[in-house]
Image (spheres, rainbow, N blue to C red):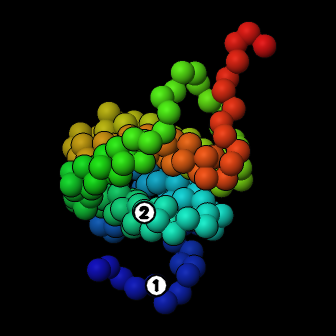
Amino acid sequence: MGKRLTKIYTRTGDDGSTGLGDGSRVPKDDERVEAYGTVDELNSAVGVLIAHLTDDKLNELLLEIQHDLFDVGGELCLPGYSLIKQERVEWLEQHLDELNAPLPALENFILPGGSAPAAHCHMARTICRRAERRVHSLQNSQADAVGPVPLKYLNRLSDLLFVVARVISRQDGVGEVQWRRPR
């Protein structure tokens, strides 16, 4: 474990730079900072979702995902370090399959929304997709910037969040609003 924060402000970022986990300094808009910052935003969105849910099983799943997202962010913050493992991607796939099995097949696109918790879940899903894009950009811009597992994890997580939103819509009795074309 790294240094413990005893003082929240350091003034070291006043020049537009920030410290990575290895102690190096980079601009605050560095692709690596964009990637782990978006994962942090996603983690916060999952926290908001948890605050709106009453389903203990989904809350436990999402809390575990929050811990994984902290690992993903840590890996992105520490160049050359690996924290998130392929087993966690497989764990997401298992939960995704279990949650998706009882749902009816989709015959059309659905609009993001529904109950407040389902809408929060869709918001988390779209932030997750942005995190995927940021990690992919990082992988393409810097040789050996980050291994393949964080991107795989985020890709599965965005799928899982889509399915969780569908589950929540049914639990809340709201259902899904299908996209209609033409209107």
SS at mark 1 in the image: loop
Using the rendered image of the protein, determine whether residue 128 is visible from the camera's viewpoint: no
Q: Position of residue 94 (x, y in %)?
A: 30, 49
Picture residue at 49% right of the left edge, 90% below the top: 6
SS at mark 2 in the image: helix
The numbered mark at residue 5 is 1
Residue that protrudes farthest toward the top in the picture: 182
Q: Position of residue 61 (x, y in %)?
A: 42, 62
Using the rendered image of the protein, determine whether residue 155 is visible from the camera's viewpoint: yes
Q: Assign the N terminus to one quadrant of the image.
A: bottom left
Picture residue at 39% right of the left edge, 66% below the top: 64
Q: Position of residue 72 (x, y in %)?
A: 35, 57
Q: Are marks 2 and 1 in contact (CB under 8 Å)?
A: no
Query: Please, what is the three-letter code of the amino acid marked with disc 1?
Result: Leu
Q: Assign the C terminus to one quadrant of the image.
A: top right
Q: Position of residue 102 (x, y in %)?
A: 44, 42
Picture residue at 46% right of the left edge, 84% below the top: 5
Placement of 99 over or under 82, stated as above or below:
above
The numbered mark at residue 61 is 2
